[in-house]
Image: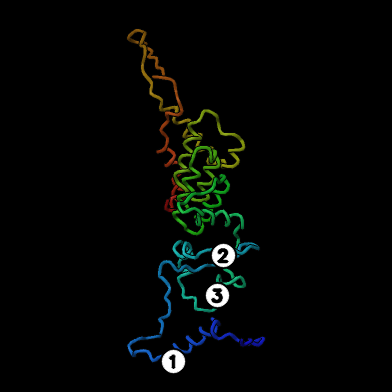
């Protein structure tokens, strides 16, 4: 019986050797001339090959898909410019981020949660009034119109704002409906404007609101109820046709007249 020496190779059962032989055999085969072994380079899909952008806000880096910023507002022009292949272009790397100055890191983080919803069907986590104001602020600043509409819709829900806040936000972020609604509600409510509200609204605004409120009283329908006296001296009595209810006051037209210039300024932003 032949004894295999220690360290000798078993050629019959060695898989690696067979693989090696097969590889060499394939490399020696002459392929037909009509078979092209050259592979075409892969191309980037024009819709679903998404580039990212790196933003620096305060001391924090954010890396997100670039496409929402490419399609909205002031960023459209910036990101439509040819960037080249170098990594030193702003937004391409952590060393060269796209800086967003005068922006709060918290505001930007909340804004991104709405722009990039985590669920397949867009759902947004429960957000406070202050958080939706952050979204309204940045969407107005950067002209993200659909995001702005969403923020306005959410803030318009019952209980999200008091009347003074509605007016102040309407002025700052150009929401004309809020301005008219806020003024009208202040006129129609039973309680008068408080000192704190007057300080926020401004003296001239308060005077105008009181003027509209008082003039609405003079337009209460009245009826003649009695006439007595002789031919030379008659007296007519009038009384209100019903109890006065401020909620029935139709004062939108008066508001538009009194606050014409302010409304023009607010309505410059398309809703």
What distance separates the C-alpha of mark 1 from that of mark 3?
49 Å
Q: Where residue 145 sits in the image (x, y, percent)?
A: 44, 55
Q: Which image quadrant: the N terminus?
A: bottom right
Q: Where residue 190 sits in the image (x, y, percent)?
A: 52, 28
- Return the residue nearer the eye: 68 or 233: 68
Frontmost of labels 1 and 3 is 1
Query: What is the secondary structure assignment of the residue under circle 1?
Result: loop
- Residue at which label 2 appears: 63
Q: Earlier in the sequence, mark 2 or mark 3?
A: 2
Measured along the vertical axis of the image, is residue 112 above or below residue 8?
above
- Return the residue nearer the eye: 208 or 189: 189
Q: Toward which corner of the image does residue 100 lie, by quadrant? A: bottom right
Q: Earlier in the sequence, mark 2 or mark 1?
A: 1
Dot label at residue 28: 1
Query: What is the secondary structure assignment of the residue under circle 2?
Result: strand
- Residue at which label 3 appears: 89
Q: At 49% across and 69% down in the image, what residue appears?
A: 51
Q: Are marks 2 and 1 in contact (CB under 8 Å)?
A: no
Q: Where residue 210 sits in the image (x, y, percent)?
A: 51, 34
What distance separates the C-alpha of mark 2 from that of mark 1?
50 Å
Tally of numbered discs = 3
Frontmost of labels 2 and 1 is 1
Q: Earlier in the sequence, mark 1 or mark 3?
A: 1
Measured along the vertical axis of the image, is residue 44 above or below residue 110?
below
Instruction: Count neighbours of disc 1 (C-alpha within 10 A) and say few if under 14, some if 14 to 19, many if 20 or more.
Output: few
- Return the residue nearer the eye: 236 or 111: 111
């Amino acid at each position: 019986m032949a004894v295999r020496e220690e360290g000798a190779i078993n050629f019959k059962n060695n898989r690696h050797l067979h693989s090696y032989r097969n590889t060499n055999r394939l490399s020696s085969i002459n392929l037909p001339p009509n078979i092209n072994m050259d592979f075409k380079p892969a191309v980037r899909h024009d819709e679903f090959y998404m580039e990212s952008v790196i933003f620096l806000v305060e001391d924090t880096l954010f890396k997100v898909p670039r496409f929402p910023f490419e399609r909205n507002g002031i960023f459209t022009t910036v990101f439509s410019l040819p960037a080249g292949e170098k990594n030193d272009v702003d937004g391409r790397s952590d060393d060269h981020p796209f800086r967003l100055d005068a922006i709060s890191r918290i505001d930007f983080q909340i804004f991104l949660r709405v722009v990039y919803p985590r669920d397949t069907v867009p759902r947004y986590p429960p957000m406070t009034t202050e958080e939706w104001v952050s979204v309204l602020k940045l969407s107005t600043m950067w002209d993200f119109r659909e995001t702005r509409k969403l923020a306005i819709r959410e803030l318009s829900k019952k209980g999200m704002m008091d009347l003074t806040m509605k007016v102040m936000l309407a002025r700052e972020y150009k929401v004309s409906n809020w301005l008219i609604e806020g003024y009208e509600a202040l006129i129609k409510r039973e309680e008068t404007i408080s000192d704190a509200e007057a300080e926020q609204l401004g003296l001239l605004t308060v005077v105008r609101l009181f003027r509209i409120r008082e003039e609405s009283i003079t337009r209460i329908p009245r009826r003649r109820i009695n006439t007595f006296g002789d031919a030379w001296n008659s007296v007519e009595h009038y009384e209100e046709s019903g109890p006065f209810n401020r909620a029935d006051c139709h004062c939108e037209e008066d508001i538009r007249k009194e606050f014409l210039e302010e409304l023009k300024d607010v309505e410059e932003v398309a809703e």
